[in-house]
Image (tube, rainbow, N blue to C red):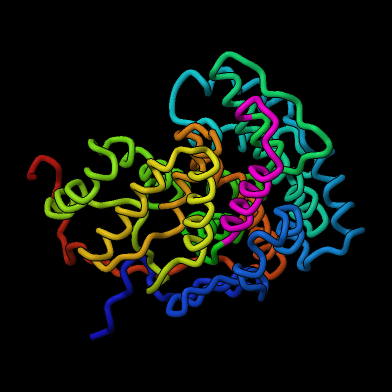
């Protein structure tokens, strides 16, 4: 009898990639061979975009060129602007942004061209447009207008400016920039795999990214960071209420978002950085409540279940301290992951094969048809 297929395609190699790699046993993450511990806090998000999309860490001249291209692409087309009033009236931010990303293709001059050069141009546009979309959506739903981006801030600093309405401190911009680097790519996760499946049909980049946005919306993927924050806010008693909440939830066979990972068997290396950042922001804001709750929950969950926090867990308190609304946490994930998604679409198109897995049929067999009047 043939072996049963792995549930959820666990350990099945679905594609070859030079973009990122994970050592789940050692708890290591690499972007094109560079350890995330070497990149985080040292490499700007724009440098990370160049690394993923264009293949190398940039020289100063290459980085200047990319920054100029990103600044020029920081616009939203007329079609997305026309759709905006309709999507803010209902649904979640991710539903709205999924539709807005799709609408971007209408005004993209390279929309129907999936050649290497066109894909490079579309990747830069999408990386530049995604934070603008989130900020424009947020401003529209609150009845205001997002501040114009400024030339002396990068993607991270401008995003905080446009979301909060205030120019971020240099350190806040640096911290958010590091967060974007940490979330930029992560091998064959659900949304990236979705993007590659769509790209493998030789569909266009915008279609692949729109599909990835749909996958990211799920609470078992990008939506987990928002769920973590909502959990923290729901616990009565602050730090003193954490242990009882965790034990009651686990005793009832409930799920605590932000813990465990399908790949990592030890601590998620991104969580290592985000824990440190959360503590720094807690100290600088004078509000240690959510950080202390997070650390207590981390301790209790490990004692009870032996699970480590993943990237979503400390990201929740970090984004909260930075002044980002809770329901925009998953869109923030998309702002960063756009760099990885577009790089994967480029890679898929450069060496394409249709992704068509098999399935195990578990239904009835040898059924006999009978006329409807005899059923």
Above/below status of 87 relative to 275: above
Image quadrant occupied by the C terminus: top left
Classify residue 104 by image quadrant. Answer: top right
Is 375 one of the magenta-colored residues?
Answer: no
The magenta region covers 163-185
Frontmost residue, 35 versus 82? 35
Furthest residue in direction left, as rendered: 374
Residue 296 in picture, x, y percent from top left: 31, 53
Residue 48 in picture, x, y percent from top left: 71, 59
| Camera sees residue 126 | no
Report the label total.
Answer: 0
Furthest residue in direction bottom, as rendered: 1
Is 164 one of the magenta-colored residues?
Answer: yes
Above/below status of 146 relative to 259: above
Magenta segment main secondary structure: helix
Above/below status of 79 relative to 273: above
Q: Name the residue located 56 percent from the left edge and 34 percent from the top edge.
A: 97
Residue 107 in picture, x, y percent from top left: 75, 33
Q: Is residue 28 left or right of residue 342?
A: left
Q: Is residue 335 left or right of residue 271?
A: right
Residue 50 in picture, x, y percent from top left: 77, 59
Furthest residue in direction top, as rendered: 143
Q: Is residue 80 left or right of residue 28?
A: right
Q: Name the residue located 14 percent from the left edge and 46 percent from the top edge.
A: 371
Q: Name the residue located 73 percent from the left edge and 50 percent from the top edge.
A: 123
| Camera sees residue 293 | yes
Q: Name the residue located 53 percent from the left edge and 52 percent from the top edge.
A: 277
Furthest residue in direction right, as rendered: 61
Frontmost residue, 141 versus 324? 324
Q: Is residue 85 left or right of residue 52?
A: left
Image quadrant occupied by the N terminus: bottom left
């Amino acid at each position: 009898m043939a072996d049963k297929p792995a549930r959820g395609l666990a350990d099945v190699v679905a594609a070859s990639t030079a973009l990122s790699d994970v050592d789940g046993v050692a708890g290591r993450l690499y972007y094109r061979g560079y350890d995330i511990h070497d990149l985080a806090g040292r490499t700007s998000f724009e440098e990370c975009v160049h690394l993923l999309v264009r293949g190398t860490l940039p020289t100063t001249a290459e980085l200047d060129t990319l920054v100029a291209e990103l600044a020029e692409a920081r616009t939203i087309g007329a079609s997305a602007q026309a759709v905006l009033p309709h999507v803010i009236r209902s649904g979640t931010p991710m539903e709205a942004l999924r539709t807005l990303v799709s609408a971007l293709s209408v005004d993209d001059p390279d929309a129907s061209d999936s050649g290497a050069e066109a894909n490079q141009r579309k990747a830069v546009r999408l990386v530049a447009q995604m934070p603008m979309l989130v900020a424009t959506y947020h401003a529209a739903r609150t009845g205001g207008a997002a501040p114009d981006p400024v030339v002396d801030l990068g993607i991270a600093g401008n995003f905080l400016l446009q979301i909060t309405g205030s120019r971020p401190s240099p350190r806040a911009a640096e911290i958010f920039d590091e967060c974007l680097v940490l979330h930029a790519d992560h091998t064959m996760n659900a949304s990236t795999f979705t993007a590659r499946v769509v790209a493998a049909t030789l569909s266009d980049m915008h279609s692949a990214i729109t599909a990835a946005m749909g996958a990211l919306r799920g609470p078992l993927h990008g939506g987990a960071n928002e769920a973590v924050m909502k959990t923290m806010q729901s616990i009565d008693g602050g730090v003193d209420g954490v242990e009882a909440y965790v034990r009651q939830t686990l005793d009832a066979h409930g799920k605590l978002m932000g813990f465990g990972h399908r790949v990592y068997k030890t601590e998620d290396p991104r969580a290592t950085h985000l824990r440190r950042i959360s503590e720094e922001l807690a100290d600088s804001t004078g509000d240690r409540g959510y950080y202390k709750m997070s650390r207590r929950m981390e301790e209790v969950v490990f004692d009870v279940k032996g699970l480590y926090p993943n990237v979503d867990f400390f990201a929740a308190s970090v984004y909260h301290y930075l002044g980002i609304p809770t329901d925009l946490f998953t869109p923030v994930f998309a702002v960063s992951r756009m760099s990885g998604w577009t790089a994967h679409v480029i890679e898929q198109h450069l060496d394409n094969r249709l992704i068509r897995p098999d399935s195990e049929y578990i239904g009835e067999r040898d059924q006999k048809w009978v006329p409807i009047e005899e059923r």
